[in-house]
Amino acid sequence: MSEKEPSILDYDTVTLLDEENALLIIDQTKLPGKIVLKKLKTAEEMWNSIYLLEVRGAPAIGVTAALGIYLLTKQVKVPQTDTEENYRVNFAALETEFEKQKEYLDSSRPTAVNLSWALKRMDKALLSMKVRNDLLITDVKDRLRQEAESIRSEDIEVCRKIGEYGLGLLKKGDGLLTHCNAGKLATIEYGTATAPMYLGHERGYGFHIFCDETRPLLQGSRLTAFELASAGMDVTVECDNMSASLMRTGRVQAVFVGCDRVASNGDTANKIGTSLLALAAKRYNVPFYVCAPTSTIDMSLKSGAEIPIEQRKPEEVTEMWYKERMAPENVKAYNPAFDVTDNDLITGIITEYGIAKEPFSESLRRIFDLKKKHQDSNVNNK
Ligand code: MRU
């Protein structure tokens, strides 16, 4: 009997191969045509992989950076005699390398705050071991590995909770529209915007999923449609400029999108085209939900105007995917990777701690208070 072909869902977005000092990722630029796994060993390989969108999506970038900086720091050689006496000197060597690589990895993409969030979390874990006199450098390296693995495994639980809250808003047979890829491929499991779809599919909701193609890099058709169809869902792909027509004709009951950074007032940066979708949804009374792990919410920013927006190469618009250039040689191309959706176009921001609604400045603050309470009670129970 022939063995069943593995599906994209059988592969992990990013995994640590600790013994090989490598990260294993799915090279998403090759999807859906080929499933190619790639090992990343050096800082440059990790940086390029994030920049080139081989590994992409806000949470997955954060996990890659966390596991990556662990691997790079782990390989700092300290003197054979790793004793308590020379801990301070050895720690300083580790810290120097960590800081250098942190800055470097953090520069690979500017918009998704998960990248710096994960690196800051790793930094905090490192700093907590600075003035200790009971540790060896091997303990520090172990602690960094644990922190990176926690960032990875927590992502699964966070997405599942977002999925449960999202599913609570839906009914059987709904038509759901999504943009870009905020799926399993952008996270570790479930995705964010796709989590209600995966959970609903498991529970027989029979959703009709519409995936915006998502120009210019086609994450919607290449990635979201691929993973959801692989899971057995009913999937339709449409060009980005067709989604208003779907909404106008009543085929979409809710829009679910992911995000790369949410400001404290609820303004949301996500893949370019998201704000147009939100405008159309408002016009046709279709609820528009942003699925946001709290790691993607940047409470230090007052509004979306402060979110840095990545600009990418013009060729992605004029040439990529075409047999020949599809714009005259003498024109420029505008290619921001993200846009900001104004908070008044958003029906709700679904986090792992519940759904924030207008006024977002207050509801997001409450979500973070809940998160803090939850974390404090976990510390007390240890
Ligand atoms: O440029 P990309 O492919 O990394 O953009 C990804 C998105 O815009 C996603 O919607 C966002 O990162 C959320 S992923 C859960």
Image (tube, helix red, strand yellow):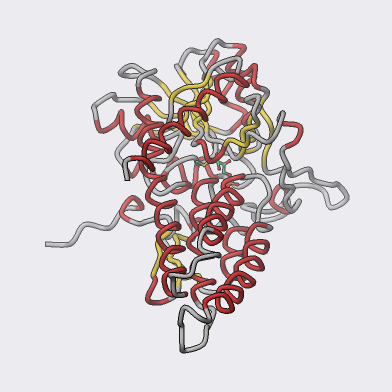
Measured from the top left, where is residue 253 in percent x and y? 45, 16
**For the point 44% across and 51% down, which residue is it?**
151
Relative to residue 69, is residue 308 depicted above or below? Answer: above
Residue 47 in which image quadrant: bottom right
Measured from the top left, where is residue 37 in percent x and y? 42, 65
Query: Is residue 66 found left or right of 206 in the rendered image?
Result: right
Residue 303 in which image quadrant: top right
**For the point 62% across and 28% down, which residue is it?**
241
Measured from the top left, where is residue 346 in percent x and y? 58, 20
Query: Is residue 288 found left or right of 235 in the rendered image?
Result: right
Relative to residue 80, is residue 366 depicted above or below? Answer: above
Q: Residue furthest left?
A: 1
Q: Residue furthest right?
A: 330
Residue 299 in which image quadrant: top right
In this view of the protein, which residue sits in the foreground, 153 or 367? Answer: 367
Relative to residue 240, is residue 31 depicted above or below? Answer: below
**For the point 43% across and 66% down, which residue is it?**
24
The N terminus - image quarter: bottom left
Determine the quadrant in which ligand 1 lies.
Answer: top right
Query: Is residue 208 found left or right of 84 in the rendered image?
Result: left
**For the point 39% across and 18% down, which residue is it?**
169
In this view of the protein, which residue sits in the foreground, 301 or 250? Answer: 301
Measured from the top left, where is residue 14 in percent x and y? 43, 58
In this view of the protein, which residue sits in the foreground, 374 or 289? Answer: 374
Relative to residue 284, is residue 91 depicted above or below? Answer: below
